[in-house]
Image (spheres, rainbow, N blue to C red):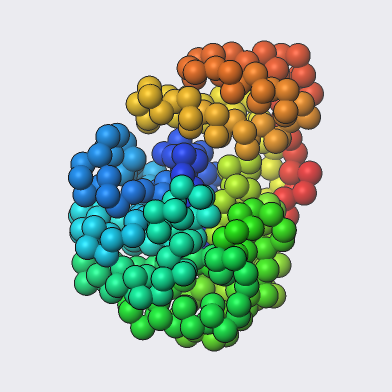
Amino acid sequence: MKFPSLFFLAPMAEITTPALRRLITEFDDRVVLHSEMLSAGAIVSGGFHNDCMTARFPFDGHFIYQIEGGDAEVMAEACRILSGNGPLGININMGCPVSKMMKKGHGAALLLDERRAARIVRACRRATQLPLSVKMRSGYDRDDEAALVRFAGMLRDEGADYIVLHPRYAKLRYTRRARWDLVRLLKESVGLPVVGNGDIVTAKGALARMKETGCDGVMIGRGAVASPWIFLQCNALAKGEECDITIDIRGLFIKGLRYIEEYLPAHLHRSRGHRFSFYFSGNIFHSHSLYSEIRKEHSIGEMIGLVDGYFQRNPREVEKRLRHDGDE
C-alpha cells in the first residue's frame, strides 16, 4: 500500500491527544496521525469519556485509530464502530509493555499467544475494509529473530496490510537502544510494508534510520511531543529543502496546554497536561524544577501560570533557533 506520508505520529496513551495532533499539524499537515491507545472493550460498551477520545477534528487529516484488547470479537466490533468515523485505517496494539496491560493478555502479551493474536487480526480483517496494521515489539522477554519473522508472517497471512515495529522486546520497556537492524530484517523478510519506531528525536536521525533499513516509513513518539515541529523538518530534509526555523517555546508550551483545555473535558486536564509538560519541558534548561511544580497542579490555568512565570524569569529561553536537520 502507498502511505500519504513517510512520517507517522505514534499512538501513545494519555499523550496523543487532539491538542498534540493540532500542534503538530500546524507545523506540517502531511503527517499520519494516530489516536491515543483506545480500549476496544470501552468502545464497544460505550465507556466513560469515549466521545472525546474517539472524536475527529478538522486537523485530523490522515488519521488512524489504535485499539487494544484480547478478545477477537470485541476487537472486531470496535473496528466496525471506529471505521464508521472515516479514518485512514485501524491499528492493533501488540506492543504496549505496561504491566497492567500485559497481565490481562493485552498489548505485548499477545506476542506470547500467536493463536489468539491470529484470531484477533482475522476478526478485525473481516470487520473492516480499511487498511489494517499491527504495532508490535520485537519480542516479549528477548529478541528472537526467527520468532519475529514467523509472527510477522502470521500477521501478513491473516490480513494485516503493514506492520509497525518498535525493535525492543517488551520487558525492556524503553531502556537500551532500539535495534533498528530488526526493522531491516522484517522489511527484507515479511513481504509487507514496514514502519520503524523507536529513539527518533531528530529529523536527521529519522532519515538515517530509513536509509539504513529500507523501511517504508518512520514513526515518532516521545520525540514528537518534545518537538512538535519535527515532522516539518523530516519532510524538508527528505526533499533536500532548507527549513531553518525559530520556535516560540513559551508560546507553543502555553498553546499546547490551552488546546488540552479546549478539546478535552476537565477530568482529563490534569493527566494530559502533566504528560505533555513532562516531555515539552525538555526544551528548557530548568526542566526538572518546572515540571516538579506543574505536577502539583490540577487545572490548566495553574499550569499555564507556572509556565508563564518561568519564562518571565528566563527570557533568553523564550525562543529556540533550529537548523533543518533538527540541531540547535
Kindly identify the residue that appears in the image at 75 percent across and 39 percent down. 321
- Percent position of residue 139, x then y: 56, 69
Instruction: Name above or below for residue 129 compared with residue 174.
Output: below
Location of residue 51 in the rendering, given as x and y in whole percent from the top left corner = 26, 38
Q: Is residue 3 left or right of residue 72?
A: right
Q: Quadrant of residue 250?
A: top right
Give the quadrant of residue 185.
bottom right
Write the residue at 46% across / 55% down.
Answer: 102
Q: Which quadrant is the C terminus positioned in?
A: top right
Residue drawn 61% across the image and 54% down it: 173
Q: Is residue 239 above or below residue 246?
A: below
What's the residue at 41%, 75% (across, down)?
A: 114
Relative placement, left or right, of 212 versus 167 is: right
User: Is residue 26 visible from the viewing direction of this image?
Assistant: no
In this rendering, the count of numbered labels is 0
Where residue 164 sits: x, y (%)?
A: 50, 67
Residue 136 visible, this angle: yes
**Coordinates of residue 1 in the picture (x, y in percent):** 40, 76
- State the residue lying farthest toward the front: 103
